[in-house]
Amino acid sequence: MIEILNPTELSRAKETGALVADILQSLKSRSTVGTNLLDIDRWAQTMIVEAGAQSCYVDYEPSFGRGPFGHYICTAVNDAVLHGLPYDYTLADGDLLTLDFAVSQGGVAADAAISFVVGESKPPESVAMISATERALSAGIAVAGPGARIGDISHAIGSVLSEAGYQINTEFGGHGIGSTMHQDPHVSNTGRPGRGYKLRPGLLLALEPWVMADTAELVTDADGWTLRSATGCRTAHSEHTIAITKDGADILTLPTQAQP
């Protein structure tokens, strides 16, 4: 299903996106050396309830997971990259943490992810990998607009990741979003320009470049959810929800203080 939102729904989407971004920034600031992943999950739950929003994750039960997710945020550490199930793990200095978070508010969902290094130690390869996903995300957003095609976004993202030296996995990528978290169209992190669905004003997309340092192969953790690099290398993931407008694309998941 591909949804095209009306102006009222788009206004709600902006509110949801700002909420997602602000909660992510709050969780980032609290995720320090000694923080337990289960504490991050509890903080996320509390913030969702206080905002009067609904989690997109806690009851999520797709074909690629094992039963309902049962938590409120994805916490992926080091070699984990996607669908990181929170567990009893205490963050250490230099850990690379990805927080992936989605909620629904007013009937419209928003989804975003950030990767960052915890503590004072900043391994250069981790910093470079995070930067590559952020640059790829910006490149994908830059070409999104009415009349462009999904392949244009995929090509822009993939070009940045490939030029940075990373292999690209095409099993998971970006997606449409609206009244539900995951919708068509699928947005691969590599592709050919001029191909695929033509973008229209009112379309919401969650774009999410992610990479693993030296492989494109994923393995599923014993928890049935967490996806890790097959070689045990580190990973990074960046994501924004955007709205296609008549003039281009608006980023909905910017923190309130970063809004223009």
Image (cartoon, rainbow, N blue to C red):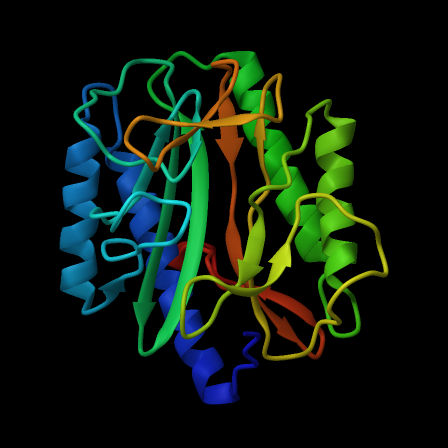
Side (left or right) of 246 relative to 123: right
240 versus 162 height, above or below: below
On screen, residue 158 versus residue 32, left or right, reads right
Q: Residue drawn at (54%, 22%), measured in percent from left and top?
A: 127
Q: Residue furthest right?
A: 194
The mark tally for this picture is 0
Quadrant location, the N terminus: bottom right
**x, y (%) of residue 44?**
21, 48
Residue 192, percent from left and from top: 83, 50
- Residue 17 visible, this orientation: yes
Horizontal placement of 62 versus 41: left or right?
Answer: right
When the figure is inspected, residue 42 is found, relative to residue 235, above or below; the finding is below
Q: Is residue 143 visible?
A: no
Q: Quadrant of residue 228?
A: top left
Q: Residue at x 64, y 67 (%)?
A: 249
Residue at x-position 24% and y-position 65%: 54
Q: Who is closer to the viewer here, 119 or 231?
A: 231
> Is residue 127 rendered to the left or right of residue 30?
right
Q: Is residue 220 above or below residue 103?
A: above
> In the rendered image of this protein, does residue 204 appear above or below residue 76?
below
23 or 172: nearer the viewer: 172
Which residue is rendered at x = 49% and y = 66% of the image? 177
The percent position of residue 214, horizontal first and vertical second, equals 62, 16
Q: Position of residue 103 (x, y in %)?
A: 32, 61
Residue 31 location, quadrant: top left
